[in-house]
Amino acid sequence: MFAARPSPPRAIPAKISLIKNQADELEPPLLKLQEHCLLLFEAEEQARRLPTLPGLLAAAKEQNKRAPETMEQGLRFLLFVTREKPDNRTASLADSFASAAALEERLRELEFDQLPPMAVSLLEQLRRAGIRAADTLKAYIEDFQKYPPGEIKAMQEFRSQLVEVRNSELSVLIEKLPPLTARYGNLLLDLAARSQALRQIELIPAFLRKIKLLHDSLQVLPAQLREQLKSPASPLNPERVAAEQAVDFFTGLRGVMLTFKMLLQSLGGRKAVSAAELQQKTVDILNNCHSHAARTEAQQTKIRLFLEERLAEYAKPFPFELLMDHMKRIITIHGGQLEQAIHGWAVQEQDTTPDQGGREEGQPDTTLARLADKLEIWGERFEVI
């Protein structure tokens, strides 16, 4: 027969109960200890995030309560001139260079086809103003990036120092944070002062907007010019200008005398000119003349050589010289009208960049000519010395 099992000792249940009671008593302090550990871990994580330029900003402001806005200005300047990756919220110097290069390329790609050479010449002057502005800005940015001011170099060295501190022991990091914060505050103040001395940096976004405005205007203007040049009612229409001037040429007492003289010339076997022929010749000249500018001797010579070629069939001195003077006057009239239409083209400026006097710059309306002048004036601020 099997022997009966002995009953468990009474001490075991008592021990189990004791362990359970002790575990119940330990659970609250263990949970509290866990909370403290999590808090410490979070504190260490936050402490290791502090050695960054944005992370130290609040502490730097706290140390120097008199100039928090100045410090923010210094940080904005630093980020603008050093940020390499695009930021959807704010521009940077690298973005500005890319924008200037893109605008220059788009300006060069503009086409002024189906327009007479004189109109193309006037549009080309404005195109060149935009290209010069983009080139000037690109050269300035390249020079700035190649030779950054000492304050930028000092902050870049400081940033490298922060990386080393962030990877050190926590005790070392905590010990070094106060002097790093003080140093950071001083560097931000230095950068703010430098940004005020290099005020053209602040003007870069507005300068780019002006270049883009010029490009956008030159993109739509040729089509409207073509319509005006074709419209019979437009004062820019060469045929209308030629007809009006041909009528004036042969009217009045002077016109009667010229008609009679032409008749005598034709009876003598030499080529004369009629009102219809004069009108046709005028249209041909206006549609092929490259410029109406006669401010310099070289420009005057160029126009005369062009007219001599177009009027070579007529006898000298009459009616050649008379026709020469007549065509010069018409070129001046028509060119002036074209120039007024193109240079006076209304554009809308939307930027409100403060100018050197501290007031807001940017009138609601301006013209293409004024816009090109502004680009030249502003470009002088960005010229590399």
Image (tube, helix red, strand yellow):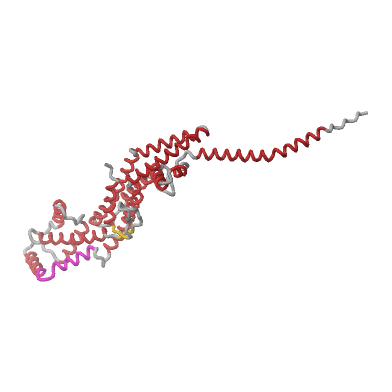
Would residue 222 be found to the left or right of residue 8 on screen?
A: left
Would residue 95 be found to the left or right of residue 268 on screen?
A: right
Q: Which secondary structure is most common in the magenta stretch?
A: helix
**Does the magenta segment cover residue 220?**
no
- Tell me where residue 44 sits by quadrant: top right
Would residue 58 be found to the left or right of residue 98 on screen?
A: right
In this view, the residue in front, 99 or 27, is: 27
Q: Is residue 279 above or below residue 169?
A: below
In this view, the residue in front, 56 or 120, is: 56
Residue found at the far right of this picture: 1
Q: Position of residue 159 (x, y in %)?
A: 43, 37
Q: How many marks?
A: 0
In this view, the residue in front, 377 or 104, is: 377
Q: Position of residue 310 (x, y in %)?
A: 16, 57
Q: Is residue 165 above or below residue 202?
A: above
- Tell me where residue 311 sits by quadrant: bottom left
**Does the magenta segment cover residue 250?**
yes
Q: Position of residue 216 (x, y in %)?
A: 34, 55
For image coordinates 47% across by 37% down, the residue present is 177
Q: Position of residue 180 (x, y in %)?
A: 44, 37
Q: Is residue 258 above or below residue 177?
A: below
Q: Which residues are magenta?
A: 237-255
Q: Give the quadrant of the N terminus.
A: top right
Q: Give the quadrant of the C terminus.
A: top left
- Tell me where residue 343 sits by quadrant: bottom left
In this view, the residue in front, 95 or 188, is: 188
